[in-house]
Image (cartoon, rainbow, N blue to C red):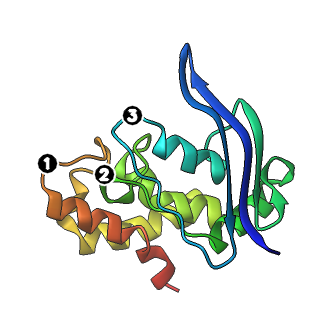
């Protein structure tokens, strides 16, 4: 495996707004990639397409020699565990509430039942009382330090084993 990531002619639009316009790139083993740009230029959309959190309109994405469009849910989740990606704004998914961000790895990567997820969330809620009020609200609380605490808690469920 020489290439870790290969993107060919990736396109993504939202309505009439073209966000990704024929993106192609290759990331070789041992290289790092940082996606930088002004707000609204498609950085997060690109990353979401790479890990298939959203579907591209056109193009091909190969990650670790696997075509992401050919992977089933379990294979895709195993692949996501092998790569690192970080979004701006402390890495919470902007399309999810704080609680949904926290529960995402439990549901999608560990396949826990809602009852098991609720039990883990209750333990975490007891430890981070400051965050509880934001759990069902927007993922963007005004307090930046609290926001960082919420982000750190995304990894907390994996420490409860």
Q: Residue at x 40, y 65 (%)?
A: 121
| Marks 1 and 3 in Cβ contact (< 8 Å) | no
| Circle 2 SS class | loop
Say which quarter of the image contains residue 51. Answer: bottom right
> Which of the pair 68/19 is nearer the observer?
19
Few, some or many residues within 10 Å of mark 1 (<14, 14–19, 20+): few
Residue 146 x/y as whole percent: 18, 62
Q: Residue at x 47, y 61 (%)?
A: 34
Eye-nearest disc, 1 or 2:
1
Q: Which corner quadrant holds the N terminus?
A: bottom right
Q: Is residue 20 above or below residue 80?
A: above
| Circle 1 SS class | loop
Q: Is residue 17 above or below residue 84?
A: above
Query: Which mark sits nearer the N-terminus, 2 or 3?
Result: 3
Q: Is residue 95 above or below residue 154?
A: above
Q: Residue at x 32, y 59 (%)?
A: 90
User: How many badges with numbers are in the image?
Assistant: 3
Q: Residue at x 54, y 71 (%)?
A: 32
**Residue 142, labelled with which disc?**
1
Residue with the mark numbered 2: 135
Is 111 left or right of 115, judged from the image as shown? right
Q: Is residue 112 visible?
A: no
The answer for how far apart the CA atoms under marks 1 and 2 are is 14 Å
The answer for how far apart the CA atoms under marks 1 and 3 are is 21 Å
Eye-nearest disc, 1 or 3:
3
Residue 133 x/y as whole percent: 21, 52
The answer for how far apart the CA atoms under marks 2 and 3 are is 26 Å
Residue 134 x/y as whole percent: 24, 50
> Which of the pair 69/98 is nearer the observer?
69
Q: Is residue 128 visible?
A: yes
Residue with the mark numbered 3: 40
């Amino acid at each position: 495996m020489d290439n870790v990531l290969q993107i060919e002619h990736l396109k993504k639009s939202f309505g009439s707004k073209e966000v990704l316009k024929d993106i192609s790139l290759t990331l070789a083993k041992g290289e790092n990639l940082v996606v930088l740009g002004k707000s609204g230029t498609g950085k997060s959309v690109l990353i979401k397409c790479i890990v298939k959190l959203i579907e591209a309109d056109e193009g091909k994405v190969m990650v670790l020699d696997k075509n992401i469009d050919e992977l089933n849910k379990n294979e895709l989740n195993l692949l996501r565990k092998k790569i690192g990606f970080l979004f701006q704004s402390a890495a919470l998914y902007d399309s999810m509430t704080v609680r949904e961000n926290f529960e995402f790895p439990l549901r999608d990567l560990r396949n826990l039942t809602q009852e098991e997820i609720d039990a883990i969330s209750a333990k975490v809620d007891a430890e981070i009382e400051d965050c509880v009020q934001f759990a069902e609200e927007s993922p963007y609380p005004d307090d930046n330090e609290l926001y960082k605490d919420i982000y750190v808690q995304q990894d907390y469920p994996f420490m409860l084993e």
